[in-house]
Amino acid sequence: MSWKGHLLVGLVLLALAIALPFVFQVNYVITQVTLLFVWGTVVTQWNLVYGVAGIFSLAQMALFAVGAYAAAMLGFYLEWSLWLAMPVAALITVVVSVLIGLACLRLRGPYVALLTLAIAQVLYLVIVNDTDCFTTEGSGCLPFFGGVRGLTRFGELGFREWLGQDWRLGHYFVALALLALALPFSAVIMRGPLGLAFRALRDNPGLARSRGISRFKYQIWVFALSAFFTGLAGAFYAANFKAIGPNVFSFSLLLFLIAMMTVGGIGTLWGPLLGALLLMGVDEGLKEVQDWRDIGLGLLLVAFVILLPQGLAGLFTRRRERAD
């Protein structure tokens, strides 16, 4: 698809997203679509690392948690406005991501996955095992990272004061703006010189290095670039729910987001977003039958892996090619 085609699709989807909360004036729908925008932002950035650069990193949810905890701690301990804490938390996430990228430089394939998963687990254990009293609040002793209870009362974005009962609309449009910035950011990288370098190192690293493409340089670049909006999404997640805890390290959530990329189409621009939309819709439909929820999602993922390995985006691409 040409740039004009992508732009047209993006504008149509943006118009639909803007109109949706005014057509479906149901708080639950607005809340769930807000969460869809958050996960859509995360998977579009994860797709840069995994799909475009071919680095099987499982650190993305850890980076999401870093952004969330950084914003919450800046708000709680330093009493910063969350509007200031969120971008600062995103920059902190970039620094952590670069360190993870440096640790993975000498590794390939499953070894990267194991190391990044181990890093995420270390962060999780640091948080849940943090039991020493750092400060006291109304409910008693509070560890530095909040421990298993997590952190609350670190501030909010102010929409409850500005919009009253319609405060969810404010959060909805912040999440939409986040996705509306993250997706073009990914598109520019994928279609630009950085994207070409990432794909070259993914598809033929030996030839890429012989042409002067430094694996060290571009691996650090892709980790850093994908981390900013991931950390920002994590910070917004904390602000949206006014609480953050170690549940963001959940392995089931990690697999759910990987499934979004797989179902939508790994390495494509619109694939992760399509996957997020489909899986959140299916997940929502299966909430009434909790016993079948995981089974249904698993069967859907298996069906796509076997029948549509290129995902929804690949299916649309093939149909367009046949039509031409």
Image: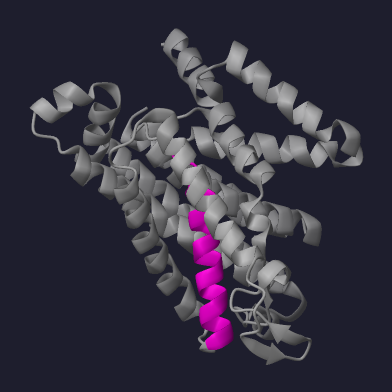
Along the line of sight, the residue nearer the viewer: 178 or 144:
144
The C terminus appears in which quarter of the rendering?
Answer: top left
Q: Position of residue 38 (x, y in %)?
A: 58, 54
Instruction: Classify residue 227 as left or right of residue 275.
Output: left
Residue 148 part of the magenta segment: no
Q: Main secondary structure of the magenta part?
A: helix
Along the line of sight, the residue nearer the viewer: 143 or 256:
143
Image height of 305 relative to 84, above or below: above
Q: Position of residue 46 (x, y in %)?
A: 46, 43
Magenta extent: 57-77
Image height of 179 relative to 54, above or below: below
Residue 75 part of the magenta segment: yes
Tell me which colouring the rendered structure shows: one colour
Instruction: Classify residue 22 as left or right of residue 268.
Output: right
Residue at the location (8% across, 33% down)? 212
Q: Position of residue 92 (x, y in %)?
A: 40, 68
The N terminus appears in which quarter of the rendering?
Answer: top left
Image height of 246 relative to 150, above or below: above
Residue at the location (22% across, 26% down)? 205
Along the line of sight, the residue nearer the viewer: 232 or 180:
232
Residue at the location (55% across, 69% down)? 69
Q: Image quadrant of residue 258?
A: top right
User: Is any part of residue 267 visible from this angle?
Assistant: no
Q: Which residue ends up furthest to the top in the rendered image?
A: 322
Q: Image quadrant of residue 299?
A: top right
Q: Position of residue 190 (x, y in %)?
A: 31, 38
Instruction: Classify residue 97 as left or right of residue 206.
Output: right
Residue at the location (54% across, 34% down)? 261
User: Is any part of residue 301 visible from this angle?
Assistant: yes
